[in-house]
Each structure stands twice: as structure tokens, then as C-alpha cells.
Image (tube, rainbow, N blue to C red):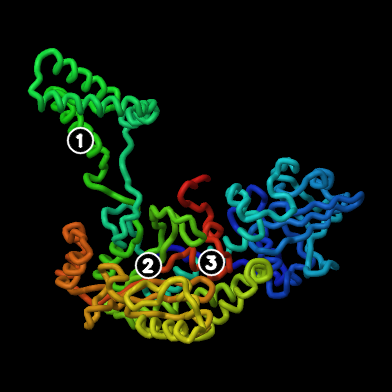
Amino acid sequence: RGAATATATVPAPAPANAAKTVGYNSVVGGRTRVSQILDAEDGGRSFIGSTVTVCGWVRTVRAQKDFTFVKFNDGSTFREMQAVIGADAAGFEEISAQGAGASVRIEGQVVESPAKGQEVELSLTSSEHSVKVLGTVDAKAYPLAKKKHSIEFLRTIAHLRPRTNLIGAVSRVRSALAAATHRFFQDRGFLYVHTPIITTADCEGAGEMFRVMRTDGEADETEAAVADAPPAPEPSEEDKAALQASKDKVRDLKAAGVKGEEFEAALGEMKRLKQVCGEVELSKKEKKALEKAKKEAEEKEKAKEFFGQPAYLTVSGQLAVENFCCSLGDVYTFGPTFRAETSNTTRHLAEFWMIEPEMAFADLADDMDCAEDYIRHCARTILETCGADLEFLTNRVDKEVADRLKLIAGEPFKRISYTEAVEELQKVVASGEAKFEYEVVWGKELQTEHEKWLTDKLYNKPTIVYNYPKDCKAFYMRLNDDNKTVAAMDILCPGIGELVGGSQREERLDVLDARLEEMGMDKEDYWWYRDLRRYGSVPHAGFGVGFERLVMLCTGVQNIRDVIPFPRYAGHAAF
């Protein structure tokens, strides 16, 4: 009461062509992103006449007597901006001596460009304009020269490859897909849950997991010493033959009842040869000492179990996020997962990201509807927000990628049961229309070649296959009334194959326990998961999307190692 009323000062609106700066760049006096100019609907023409400050990395420098032409990019867009720098501009000589890779701050005027393919460029013609080299480059040592590089080479310089057109485009698409993922689920009332990376449960039951153990300096030194110790020499064939002959002699002497010095001499020779050949007989005292050492080693190994039991890097957040689903309703997790799979293919990584939503009070039909809506939402997002990147990817990587995204965004997906899919595939085999390497048999997993035929030949669109044989799927998928199939589904997409895998979860405790036993899994390891079925169980469903597979779909890139910033796979964990 009696307090003065505060009056907010409303700033005057900026002119339409004012150069907007983005925050957190005070060290360079503020800057305008290149995307704000070149990705504007008018190609940046509304900025003409404005003085802007931009920063970025040089792509090319073409120096002449009175002018230097610099093309640069700041990562905010695929497009490069050109700056025409006159001799009167501050920093003219410094930039003229630089090359690709140098970082710069450029302040100049936006003008209409006479060059083909760009609406505007920067003009630096007076002493009021300036270019400052922030970071120089040794042109001879810089590994990203103007020439084209193979993607295999780029993987060896993962710290620099984001500067290339390909990885830059893929990175922006990946970022857009991550934002689209959160926007899709948040807009529909899903809660974002952070599930643990370290787990004691194997969600898939495949056993291909990375084990987590505490390191022990003393133990590590001992293990290293053992590892560095030279191996015991292999006994020669002569020694092996001599040992066998000695054994035969001792056996014959025993059979003949020979004792005394002759027998003791033969026995001594046999023991000597056993030592030579590594067949050492231990005394009772030595055996007891060995058992003690073994026990101590086991206790030391057990001490490494930081969590008191074997723990692993998770292969999926699904089991954990189900806990929250059965308390909070619709939820999702989006994070890194790991698999110790040694497959050296274009489709596998040891570290990858998964999007895993779970819906309470939902069945398989709801699961398919949500998954289809999500994938179509992602396709529309890339078509609407990544135009320049998509144009490059269509021209240089996969000429069908844009049309494929339009197909996904524009038409409902085809839905067929697993049984129907097998029947259709068997028909084309019988007619001679198709020949597959792997036999099409009910009860077996559909192979990539089968999935490709369904999506690329038979239906020419994304296809959802549902109700798979139970032996093909995980223990947590709801058993159908036929006792042969489970309420599972996969979304297959042209150009990528399986993109989504999901199911209605088994909410009946007795059926879940039977499935665990059937698959040879200890139900006590999943006591907490089983509790969800004991205390207020509800029908619920969910699915998982391999994020890198989704990025591959939206970019046309064929190798999964090129759609993640720092790929991890067998034999490779650099950077």
C-alpha cells in the first residue's frame, strides 16, 4: 500500500530492414547470423542498406590488387555469404593473406549482389568497414582444402568435419529432428523422463552389453604385469613324445610290479618331463595355496562391482520409462544407448540415441497411430525448415530423399499383419517375380531384402507390419489370444528399412512370468518391473526409434557413422 507504480519503458520498434543481432556474442560486439540474412524469405533483400557484423570461417579467399573476395559460413545455414572487401577497409591486407579455415569478424554493408545464385552480399568499401582475422590458418597444414574429400577420410578428422557441406547439413537436420521430437511429444502432453544410462537389466535379452566396473590401480598394475609377462614356451614335439613314452614306461612298470630304484627313476623322469610340458602336479599344500589365491582373486573382482552387482550400459530406456508411464501417464525418454555388437556394417553403432515414448491406457492401435504421426511430423519439419540443406542432400547425396520425405509426410502408411506380409512375399517368390537370399517362412524374422520389397516394390510407401510371431520378439510384448503372436509392430520405410519397433506391453503378471521363464530369464532380476503388474496394472504401449536411423532417412546418408557427431564402433572410439 502506498508503493509507487513501476512503469515499463517500451522500446520503439526497429525498422523493417534493421540488422538483428543474436545474444551472447559481446566479445565481438554482437553479430548477425548468416541464416538471418540469406534464409530470409526475400533472400536478404530487406537487409539491403544495413550495416551488419557477421562472424564465421572462411571457405575461399580470392585476392586481387584493389579487392579481395571472401566466401565464408558460420554454420547457421548451408549457404555461404560473400564479402567484397576494398583496399580502404580495415584489415584488407590481413585477410588477403589468409585462406580456407581462418575465422573472421566482418563488418560491412549489405548490398544487392550482381553474382548469380545470391541475392545479397557484403560490401566493405570504406574505412568505416572492417574485417578482423580472429584465428589464422596454415594453408599447407589445413586438412580441409577446397578439393572434395571422401567420407572415410572425414571420419579421421571428426573434429573438423562439421565444417564440410555434408556434415554441416547433416548436423542441422539432426538438430531440427531433435527439436521436432521434443516439440511433438511436449505438444501432446507427454512428460520427458531421464532414464538411467547404467542399469542391471537387459531390456532386449540379447546379452550384447558393456559391463561397468570400478577400476583399481593396484589390480590394474597386476593385470598389466601379467599381460606384459612373456608367454610360457611351447613344449617341443620331442618333449611331448618323450613325456608320452615316460608315461607308458611308468604304467608298464606298475603293471609288472616293478619297484625300487628303477621305478623311482622312471617316475622322476616323468615328473621332470611334465614340468617341461606344463603338466605340473601340485602337492596338497600347493593346491591349498592355489585355492586361497583363487578365492582372494574372486573377492578382489567382486570388490570392483561398484554397485554390488553386475551393472551395464543400457541398451534401452524402455523398462525404466515404463515405471513412470504406470504412474504419470504418457511419457518419453530420449537419450544415448549402447550395444556391444561387433557388426562392422553401415547400420550399426556401439553408441547411439533412442527415442522411446510410453503411453498409459493404450493398445497396439494407439501405438501405431502415435508412431506414424511422429514420423510424419519429423518429415514435415525437415521439408519446412531445412530447405537449403535438403536441396544439397538431394543434389549430392540421394536424389530421392526430398521426394521420399514428401511421400512420408503426405500419405497415410500401409498397415498389414506379419502373416499377410509373409503371404504376399511368398506369392512373389512363387510367381518368379522376386528371388530372395533368405527364405520367406512364417515364424522367422523378415530380412532387409523382404522389408525393402514391401516398401519399395509392393506398396511404394512406409508400411507398418504388426502381430509378429512371439519367438521373434522380446519378453515384454503382449501375447495375443492365438498364443503364437504378440501385439508388436515395426514401421518399415523406403530407403532405410526398419525405422520403428514397438508393441503393446504385457500387463498380465502370470503371462509375463511365463514368457520370462520360456526365454530362460530370471524373473527375480525384473522384480521391480513385475511389481508394475502387481499394483494397479494398466494396458500400455510404446515404441522405440533409432535416432540415427531417422537422420539417415531424412538426409539420404547411407552410413550411420556419418549421421552422429562422433561415431563409436568396434575398434574405434577416437575423439
Residue of label 3 = 552
Residue 536 or 526: which is nearer the viewer?
526
Q: Which mark is residue 569?
A: none
Q: Amino acid at mark 1?
A: Glu
- Which residue is pictured at 74% across the width and 61% down the height? 81
Q: Amino acid at mark 2?
A: Glu
Front position among marks 2 and 3: 3
Q: Amino acid at mark 3?
A: Met
Quarter location, residue 71: bottom right
- Using residue 239 as the reference point, say whether residue 427 is left or right of it: right
Residue of label 2 = 356
Residue 231 or 173: which is nearer the viewer?
231
Quadrant where the N terminus lies? Answer: bottom left
Secondary structure at badge 3 equals: helix
Q: Is residue 232 visible?
A: no
Disc 1: CA contacts within 10 A as few (<14), some (14-19) or many (>=20)? few
Disc 2: CA contacts within 10 A as few (<14), some (14-19) or many (>=20)? many
- Using residue 89 as the reference point, say whether residue 413 is left or right of it: left
Q: Earlier in the sequence, mark 2 or mark 3?
A: 2
Secondary structure at badge 2 equals: strand
- Which residue is pictured at 20% across the width and 65% down the height? 516
Quarter location, residue 350: bottom left
Q: Which mark is residue 299?
A: 1
- Using residue 343 as the reference point, say whether residue 132 is left or right of it: right
> Relative to 456, does residue 340 appear above or below in the rendering?
above
- Which residue is pictured at 18% across the width and 33% down the height? 295
